[in-house]
């Protein structure tokens, strides 16, 4: 039977619209297996940086750093390459008013260089470091960099000279994010400190003193900061299957300016265990004015198959309550792997999405896209849209043909099961079967493949404090 399962969304009174595609540019750096890594929007331009493979067939491929400049309408302006060394692996980039700076690793991750280009793409100079470093934020006078494998935080001037540095006291994965506000700086990354953990840390920008550190179990974590000093972590998280093998789910966490968890949300991007092995978080962005935090990554391409093929994935959440308001997945043609690589909100609060596709070593394009995303509106029972008790509402419409909406409410984080049965008690569809954050929720039930008749929707929930809830509603399918 075709799957009858659709994902959890916010109730209609507070629903934000799905992303609407405004523009798309298909491009590349010129190689066979180019890999985009990041995007930057500044000075009416969009910049994409990543890896260029010099068109050599494996295993002789030499990877170079590449940096491409687009106008705001996505027309291409110029492309810059670092061809001065073998294995120049692009890591991070910044755009100043009069220069572009790209950091790259050299000689298989033993040291780094900062490459400076002018606004016309002309190479100007190179500054070498004896450690691998990432650039990720700046003030009017300083550039922030981290040597993740050495655990050192740097403040650089705009020429690349070190002004100050701190020893963080720990090492981390090479994928780090840094954000600052006033006298504080936030560091986001993940590490294996005895177990896999993703973390956010707030430090004094002048002294380097740690103010607080939030850690949660997970891998491949990425973080961002909103206008009020709240942090958000998007990560992949291990979970065990029914046979004890390792599966992956997503988790999104909001942390306030004092380091306390406000809410978190865990979910499987696929309904079947067979398709829960490829669930990789790659990016996160937040817009306070939209009341929206968006995470991006990739998931197993098909629902009932574990092949390693992956689809691009985006999900949008309310920043006030952590409720998922939409999700989007897609592929490009017959490509075996499609992945979201980076996301940013632009100056108009539209969503910039960088993704790429790959299929068996053939030339691999990247995709630069701009989406309009709607602001997520408040509901009448704000703040927080948190109900006072459990409830399962009657589906609407009822009778229905062929789909209907099922709403329910949970007052606190709970394990929730929502399933549809026939009148003999046989399970036809499991709509929800996971831990869900507090709030008012909605799922859709599509009965296209079922005959007319009466069906039952049953909800059971168990809160973390032990409270148990159960309720059943009759639904009438009339074709």
Image (tube, rainbow, N blue to C red):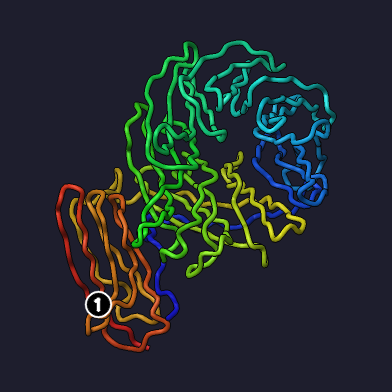
- Residue shown at the point (49%, 12%) measured from the top left: 206
- From the viewer's side, name the closer residue of 212 and 308: 308
Place of residue 262 in the rendered image (x, y in percent of width and height, measured from the top left)? 32, 38
**Residue 105 versus residue 260: which sits nearer the camera?**
105
What is the tally of numbered marks visible in this picture? 1
Residue at image location 58% in from the left, 18% down from the top = 154
Residue 222 as seen in the image, left or right of residue 262? right
Identify the secondary structure beneath mark 1. Answer: strand
Name the residue carrying label 1: 456
Residue 349, x across and y down, in percent = 56, 43
User: Percent x, y for residue 426?
Assistant: 26, 80
Name the foreground residue: 290 vs 336: 336
Is residue 70 in sight in this rendering? yes
Image quadrant in which the N terminus is located: bottom left
| 348 or 34, nearer to the observer | 34
Q: Is residue 200 above or below residue 397?
A: above
Characterize the local packing of mark 1: few (<14), some (14-19) or many (20 or more) Cα atoms within 10 angstroms.
many
Is residue 13 at least partly visible in the picture? no
Residue 303 versus residue 220 in the image, above or below: below
Residue 65 percent across, percent down from the top left: 75, 37
Question: Is 215 positioned to the left or the right of 328 in the image?
Answer: left
> In which quarter of the view is residue 430 placed?
bottom left
Looking at the rendering, in which quadrant would you find the C terminus? bottom left
């Amino acid at each position: 039977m075709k799957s009858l399962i659709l994902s959890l969304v916010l109730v209609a009174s507070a629903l934000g619209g799905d992303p609407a595609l405004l523009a798309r540019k298909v491009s590349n750096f010129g190689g066979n297996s180019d890999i985009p890594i990041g995007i930057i929007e500044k000075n009416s331009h969009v910049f994409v940086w990543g890896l260029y493979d010099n068109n050599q067939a494996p295993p002789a491929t030499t990877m170079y750093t590449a940096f491409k400049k687009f106008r705001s309408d996505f027309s291409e302006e110029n492309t810059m390459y670092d061809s001065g060394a073998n294995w120049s692996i692009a890591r991070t980039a910044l755009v100043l008013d009069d220069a572009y700076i790209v950091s790259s690793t050299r000689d298989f991750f033993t040291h780094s260089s900062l490459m400076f280009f002018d606004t016309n793409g002309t190479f100007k100079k190179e500054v070498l470091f004896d450690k691998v470093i990432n650039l990720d934020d700046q003030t009017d006078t300083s550039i922030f960099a981290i040597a993740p494998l050495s655990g050192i935080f740097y403040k650089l001037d705009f020429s690349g000279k070190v002004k100050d540095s701190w020893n963080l006291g720990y090492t981390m994965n090479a994928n780090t994010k840094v954000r600052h506000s006033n006298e504080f700086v936030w560091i986001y990354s993940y590490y294996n400190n005895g177990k896999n953990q993703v973390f956010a840390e707030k430090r004094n920008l002048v002294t380097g003193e740690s103010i607080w550190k939030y850690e949660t179990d997970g891998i491949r974590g990425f973080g961002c900061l909103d206008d009020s000093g709240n942090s958000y972590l998007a990560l992949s998280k291990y979970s065990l299957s029914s046979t004890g093998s390792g599966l992956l789910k997503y988790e999104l966490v909001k942390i306030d300016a004092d380091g306390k968890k406000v809410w978190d949300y865990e979910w499987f991007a696929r309904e079947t265990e067979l398709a829960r092995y490829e669930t990789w978080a790659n990016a996160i962005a937040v817009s306070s004015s939209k009341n929206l935090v968006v995470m991006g990554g990739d998931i197993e391409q098909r629902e009932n198959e574990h092949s390693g093929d992956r689809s691009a994935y985006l999900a949008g959440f309310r920043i006030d309550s952590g409720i998922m308001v939409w999700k989007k997945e897609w592929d490009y043609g017959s490509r075996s792997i499609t992945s979201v690589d980076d996301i940013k909100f632009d100056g108009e609060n539209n969503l910039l999405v960088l993704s790429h596709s790959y299929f068996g070593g053939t030339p691999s394009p990247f995709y630069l896209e701009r989406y309009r995303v709607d602001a997520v509106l408040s509901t009448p029972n704000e703040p927080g849209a948190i109900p006072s008790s459990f409830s399962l509402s009657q589906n609407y419409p009822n009778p229905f043909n062929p789909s209907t909406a099922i709403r329910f409410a949970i007052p606190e984080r709970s394990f929730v099961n929502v399933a549809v049965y026939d009148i003999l008690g046989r399970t036809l569809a499991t709509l929800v079967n996971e831990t869900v954050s507090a709030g008012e929720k909605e799922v859709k039930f599509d009965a296209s493949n079922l005959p007319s008749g009466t069906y039952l929707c049953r909800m059971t929930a168990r809160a973390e404090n032990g409270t148990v809830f159960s309720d059943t509603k009759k639904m009438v399918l009339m074709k």
